[in-house]
């Protein structure tokens, strides 16, 4: 991580209907040098994303209203370059398959360790950088 | 439906079928019990692990885990009813109780209505906040867990206050009067407030409740000689001193007589509806129905000097300091700004040196008037210009401030007093909330990463998150714990429950081995002590006395002081331990994980004594093993196919029943040699017992030669093969052993599960024995207890019974402990004739440990 103030920080959007999850993730991402915005309902998350796309989106699957899959689709339509990570408490092979099909970068089952999600985000970050350079 | 009809079904089934259940079926059920037992223990450990802060979990996780647990425990009870038909009804009742509690908690219904009206202050903890209000609950925790002195006294619970309000239809009146008012309608708010307060003061207290309060107040105020002491009544609202401080918003009524206590309670309750408090709640976004008030009642303290302090001065955060303001007499005018105060700033680490002191002329102080109420009195001339605190007192304050801050992970605003006898008493503590822009915080953090020198990172598992700064103190021997330096970081090879004794002084813990779900980790979490376990050889990089910064959130250890990290933690937007989910999980675990049924010989070891799921699980396990042993004793014929004799140089008279579906080493054989034993725990046990023979060759201080002779003699007393099957019985599988040995008058039980998955591993040892006089027996118990403690067991002793537990070590280390128990089992034989003097207890224990050291180490090498 560079201490150089001019390097733009990667922007991360976190969406989970359980406040505890976003409350835990936001400071962790900030501490790791990212800019994080968090939402607990998909409508406002989407509105914000449409306004200004994020580099990385982390979303839960099962939610009231628009669910994670639908959100993922919208995100990808608006900004195909955004990297998406799905986090869910109902991890099944089918949901995993579907999220990959919808263009998710990785799939993380809840509960997870902070170090775990950081590692996935780190990998995604390098993948995004490669795509830029290549 | 579900549970209840299920219970009936099982009961019917149990009653009808149990007597004739064929052995094979019971045997199979027994295996199922073992598996479920492990499953339950693993689930509980997982849940405990989540409390450490390393995991992100949500409500759904809590619900799922509880459901799985309830399911497994329910099935355990059903299983037991197949093996042995007794007392399921009581077990199901105990189960239903716990399940109901969990259901209510998950539904968000905490059971305040049944909370008692009067709660003793010293019984409170942070989880008592719904019944006792936040302020008093936190104070209780400071006394109970942090171990600082708090005033004695009691709390009139939210339930009691609500009973009073409801009886007089006051909640409805309050709603009506304030309805529709906004922050702009100052005049109307003041008028409504006055009406409500008058109505409250005029309302009668329910008689029984008033009597109870007066009675409690009288006994609190009573002094053996002299007039009763005055009482202080303080507000304690649900959210007071939490995220919103409500500082100074609610009333305290000082120095009242017991006879006026009830009136003072009403005054405190009326204070809830003062215009200032109403506006404050509005401003902070609180709904009226979210306000529930409890009232604390404490004796007035004969204060010599009092004041307030910030553990982390908010005005000068760059140069960290503790800020203390103090004046002679009572505390109230210091925080109320009605007297002149001395101001000090202190270093934030021992010995809390005083950095600056501003001493002013203090002309008046507040004292308790003999006629009731507080009054101002002049300060004697010679005390006016001297500092009101000594260096020693400042040091005490600094230490207290840091202990509270460390525990609550937030800078603290603490009100305190030194009484006439010079005792420091904590009156109240609340978090200081100061926030910074996230981006500023993040930038600041980048600089740390660039600047600080990392000793190691990403090693081990976080057992409790947090940041700790202090000098390293290496703990290798028990003596190293004795003078544990305040504020040091404990570094050790293994985790051990013995570390508990240093946890009130340590700032953090690092270990080379161990599991975040082990015993020590659980205790570290109770102390909220930043802890990383299983760091491996990296720990060798640390030197005694070297100051380090442990970041048990990012899992990094830095050289030197990285104060930005601590600052970062202290300004975090939300403290994880304050989150609803954390508190919920913690409360639920309180009904799930504690084990109270430890001693199967205690009269309490029965279904009605089961208070937690762990208790039920333990009870069932014990009962199932007993039942199977009884079965093997009484119905040898049925067991013929299953049991095999152990053949060894030591005529142990041991029968082995293999629980694996495909037992190894020729399942047709009826006799097994030691080398054919394929249960790893049993093999390790026998190894430990038998290899003690080598000690015969050389003279050792505890005379191991005669010890083995005595073992052989005892075993030899009953010729092998003729001894009744079941006396010495081992139920085993590849990873499991339940060993029951009756050697002469000794009864030893070992229950061991040792596999590849560290979280399943558990070892339980129990010893009881007779022969000698009681004094000698308890000495023997203490000697064994000491050996176990020195070997990192968690030990419980009662008279001549010793029980030791170990869990969640890696396989090799678990087996090492089983070998140790093998040697120890032999050793216990000779203890009967030893231990003539008290001093022998320690000497013999040390000598034993010294002599078995080589055989344990030797195996380490060969493995």
Image: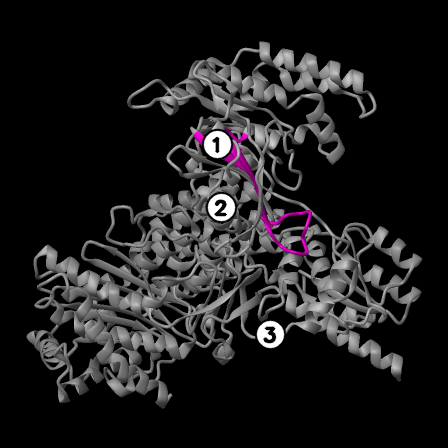
Asked if marks 3 and 2 fall on the same chain, the answer is yes
Task: Say which residue label 1 marks.
Answer: B383
Tell me the CA gap for discs 1 and 3.
Answer: 56 Å
Q: Magenta residues, as a range?
A: B303-331
Q: Position of residue A11 (x, y in %)?
A: 83, 64
Q: Nearer the viewer, mark 1 or mark 3?
A: 1
Q: Residue at x 85, y 68 (%)?
A: A55
B244 in relation to B803, above or below: above
Name the chain under label 1: B
Numbered mark located on residue B53 in the image: none
Q: Position of residue B796 (x, y in %)?
A: 29, 57
Q: Nearer the viewer, residue B2 or B827?
A: B827
Task: Say which residue label 2 marks.
Answer: B394
Q: Is residue B463 magenta?
A: no
Numbered mark located on residue B458 in the image: 3
- Give the SS element for disc 2: helix
Name the chain under label 3: B
Give the mark nearer the N terminus: 1 vs 3.
1
**Relative to residue B566, is residue B622 drawn left or right?**
left
Q: Position of residue B554 (x, y in %)?
A: 63, 67
Q: Residue at x 93, y 57 (%)?
A: A51
Q: Nearer the viewer, mark 3 or mark 2?
A: 2
Structural crowding at the residue carrying mark 3, measured as other residues with C-alpha within 10 Å and reported as few (<14), some (14–19) or many (≥20)? few
**Relative to residue B600, is residue B596 drawn left or right?**
right
- Give the SS element for disc 3: loop
């Amino acid at each position: 991580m560079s201490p150089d103030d001019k390097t733009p920080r990667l922007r991360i959007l976190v969406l989970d209907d359980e406040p505890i999850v976003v409350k835990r993730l936001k400071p962790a991402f900030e501490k790791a040098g990212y800019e994080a915005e968090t939402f607990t309902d998909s409508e406002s998350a989407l509105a914000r994303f449409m306004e200004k796309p994020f580099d990385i989106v982390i979303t839960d699957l099962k939610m009231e209203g628009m669910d994670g899959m639908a959100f993922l689709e919208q995100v990808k339509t608006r900004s195909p370059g955004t990297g998406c990570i799905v986090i869910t408490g109902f991890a099944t092979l089918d949901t995993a398959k579907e999220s990959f099909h919808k263009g998710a970068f990785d799939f993380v089952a809840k509960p997870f360790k902070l170090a775990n999600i950081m590692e996935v985000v780190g990998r995604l970050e390098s993948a995004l950088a490669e795509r830029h350079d290549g | 439906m579900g549970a209840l009809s299920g219970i009936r079904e099982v009961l019917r089934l149990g009653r009808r079928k149990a007597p004739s259940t064929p052995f094979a079926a019971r045997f199979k059920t027994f295996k199922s019990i073992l598996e479920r037992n492990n499953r339950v223990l693993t689930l509980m450990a997982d849940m405990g692990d989540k409390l450490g802060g390393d995991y992100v979990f949500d409500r759904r996780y809590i619900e799922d885990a509880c459901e799985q647990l309830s399911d497994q425990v329910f099935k355990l009870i059903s299983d037991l009813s197949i093996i042995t038909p007794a007392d399921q009804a009581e077990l199901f009742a105990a189960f239903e109780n716990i399940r109901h509690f969990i259901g209510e908690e998950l539904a968000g219904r905490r059971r305040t209505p049944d909370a008692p009206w009067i709660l003793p202050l010293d019984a409170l903890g942070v989880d008592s906040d719904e019944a006792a209000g936040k302020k008093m609950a936190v104070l209780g925790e400071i006394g109970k867990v942090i171990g600082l002195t708090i005033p004695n006294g009691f709390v009139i619970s939210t339930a009691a206050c609500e009973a009073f309000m409801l009886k007089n239809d006051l909640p409805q009146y309050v709603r009506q009067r304030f309805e529709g008012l906004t922050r702009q309608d100052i005049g109307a708010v003041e008028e409504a407030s006055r009406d409500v307060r008058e109505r409250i003061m005029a309302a009668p207290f329910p008689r029984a409740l008033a009597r109870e309060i007066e009675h409690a107040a009288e006994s609190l105020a009573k002094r053996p000689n002299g007039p009763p002491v005055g009482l202080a009544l303080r507000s304690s609202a649900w959210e007071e001193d939490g995220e919103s401080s409500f500082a100074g918003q609610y009333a305290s009524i000082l120095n009242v007589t017991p006879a006026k206590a009830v009136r003072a309670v009403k005054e405190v309750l009326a204070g809830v509806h003062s215009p200032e408090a109403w506006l404050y709640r509005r401003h902070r976004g609180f709904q009226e129905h979210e306000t529930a008030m409890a009232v604390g009642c404490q004796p007035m303290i004969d204060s010599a000097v009092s004041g307030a302090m910030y553990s982390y001065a908010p005005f000068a955060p760059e140069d960290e300091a503790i800020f203390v303001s103090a004046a002679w007499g009572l505390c109230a005018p210091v925080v109320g700004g009605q007297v002149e105060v001395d101001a000090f700033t202190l270093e934030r680490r021992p010995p809390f040196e005083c950095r600056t002191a501003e001493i002013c002329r203090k002309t008046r102080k507040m004292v308790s008037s003999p006629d009731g109420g507080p009054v101002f009195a002049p300060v004697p001339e010679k005390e006016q210009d001297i500092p009101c605190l000594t260096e020693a007192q400042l040091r005490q304050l600094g230490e207290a401030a840091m202990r509270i801050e460390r525990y609550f992970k937030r800078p603290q605003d603490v009100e305190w007093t030194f009484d006439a006898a010079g005792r420091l008493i904590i009156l109240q503590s609340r978090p200081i909330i100061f926030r910074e822009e996230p981006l500023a915080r993040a930038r600041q953090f980048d600089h740390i990463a660039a600047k600080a020198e990392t000793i190691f990172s990403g090693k081990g598992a976080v057992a409790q998150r947090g940041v700790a700064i202090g000098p390293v103190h290496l703990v290798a021997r028990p003596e190293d714990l004795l003078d544990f330096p305040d504020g040091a970081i404990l570094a050790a090879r293994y985790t051990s429950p013995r570390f508990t004794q240093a946890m009130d002084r340590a700032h953090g813990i690092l270990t080379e081995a161990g599991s975040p779900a082990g015993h020590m980790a659980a205790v570290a979490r109770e102390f909220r002590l930043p802890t990383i376990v299983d760091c491996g050889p990296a720990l060798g990089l640390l030197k005694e006395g070297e100051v380090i910064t442990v970041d048990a959130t990012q899992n990094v250890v830095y050289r030197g002081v990285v104060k930005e990290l601590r600052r970062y933690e202290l300004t975090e937007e939300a403290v994880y331990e304050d989150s609803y989910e954390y508190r919920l999980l913690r409360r639920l675990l309180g009904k799930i994980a504690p084990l109270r049924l430890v001693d199967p010989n205690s009269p309490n070891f029965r279904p009605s004594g089961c208070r937690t799921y762990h208790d039920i699980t333990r009870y069932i396990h014990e009962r199932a093993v007993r039942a199977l042993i009884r079965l093997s004793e009484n119905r040898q014929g049925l067991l013929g196919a299953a049991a095999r004799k152990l053949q060894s140089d030591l005529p142990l008279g041991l029968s082995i029943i293999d629980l694996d579906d495909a037992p190894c080493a020729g399942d047709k054989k009826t006799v097994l040699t030691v080398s054919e034993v394929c249960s790893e725990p049993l093999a390790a046990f026998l190894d430990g017992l038998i290899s003690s023979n080598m000690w015969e060759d050389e003279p050792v201080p505890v005379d191991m030669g005669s010890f083995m002779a005595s073992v052989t003699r005892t075993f030899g007393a009953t010729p092998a093969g003729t001894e009744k099957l079941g006396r010495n019985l081992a139920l085993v599988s590849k990873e499991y052993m339940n060993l029951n040995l009756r050697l002469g008058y000794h009864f030893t039980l070992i229950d061991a599960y040792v596999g590849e998955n560290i979280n399943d591993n558990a070892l339980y040892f129990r010893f009881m024995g007779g022969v000698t006089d009681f004094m000698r027996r308890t000495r023997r118990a203490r000697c064994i207890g000491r050996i176990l403690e020195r070997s990192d067991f968690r030990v419980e002793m009662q008279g001549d019974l010793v029980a030791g537990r170990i869990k969640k070590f890696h396989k090799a280390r678990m087996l090492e402990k089983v070998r140790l128990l093998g040697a120890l089992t032999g050793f216990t034989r000779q203890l009967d004739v030893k231990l003539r003097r008290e001093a022998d207890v320690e000497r013999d224990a040390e000598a034993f440990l010294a002599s078995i050291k080589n055989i344990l180490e030797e195996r380490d090498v060969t493995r």
